[in-house]
Amino acid sequence: QLQLVESGGGFVQPGGSLRLSCTASGPTLDQYAIAWFRQVPGREREVIACITNSGFKENYPNSVRGLFSISRDNAQNTVWLQMSSLEPEDTAVYYCAAKATFCLGDRRSYPYWGQGTQVTVSS
C-alpha cells in the first residue's frame, strides 16, 4: 500500500518561498503520477501541479504558472513543489496524491493521499 507524507509547510510572508516535499513509502514512486492539490476551507480541493511517472510536468491554474514548480526524484521516492512569490491567497492545506502513470486534474482519480500540510501566507 502506497503511503504519502507531506512536509515543508509553514508560515511565510507575502513574496516568500516554500518547498513542499511528498515522500512515499511502500511501493516505489516510479509507477505513479504525483499531483499537488490545495484546499481552502469551504472550497473545492484544487489541483495545482502534476508530474507523470516519467517526469512530464503539468501546471493547472494560471495563478501558479511560472511561480510553482513540481519535480521528482524516484530514487529518493520524493516529489517536491517549489513555491515562490507566495501571496495570502495561496494560504491553504496542500496535499500530494498519487495515481498510476499519467496525470489527471480530477481529484477523484487519485486513490492515494497524504495527510496534508498547512501553508499560511501572511504579513
Image: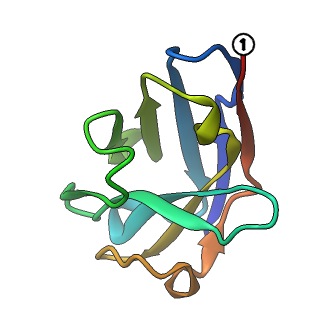
| x and y percentages locating residue 49 in the rendered image | 38, 55
Residue 11 on image: x %, y %: 74, 21
In which image quadrant can residue 83 be found? Answer: top left
Would residue 28 be visible to someone looking at this image?
A: no
Quarter that holds the C terminus: top right
Relative vertical location of residue 17 with respect to residue 120 in this rendering, above or below: above
Task: Write the residue at 37% across / 44% down.
Answer: 64
Q: Nearer the viewer, residue 41 or 69?
A: 41
Amino acid at dot 1:
Ser
Residue 117, percent from left and from top: 73, 43
Name which residue lies at 57% across and 53% down.
24
SS state under label 1: loop
Q: Which residue extends farthest right?
A: 41
Q: Quadrant of residue 100?
A: bottom left
In this rendering, does residue 54 appear at all? yes
As drawn, 15 above or below 74: above
- Residue 9, above or below 17: below
Where residue 86 appears, as percent x and y from the top left, is 51, 26
Question: Which of these two is toward me, 118 or 6?
Answer: 118
The residue indicated by pointer 1 is 123
Q: Is residue 113 left or right of residue 16?
A: right
On the picture, is 79 further left or further right than 38?
A: left
Q: Residue at image x 81%, y 59%?
A: 41
Q: Residue at x 55, y 34 (%)?
A: 20
Q: Quadrant of the N terminus?
A: bottom right
Is 28 located above or below residue 85 in the figure? Answer: below
Question: Which color mode does the image show?
Answer: rainbow
Q: Please state which of residues 84 and 51 is positioned toward the viewer in this rendering.
A: 84
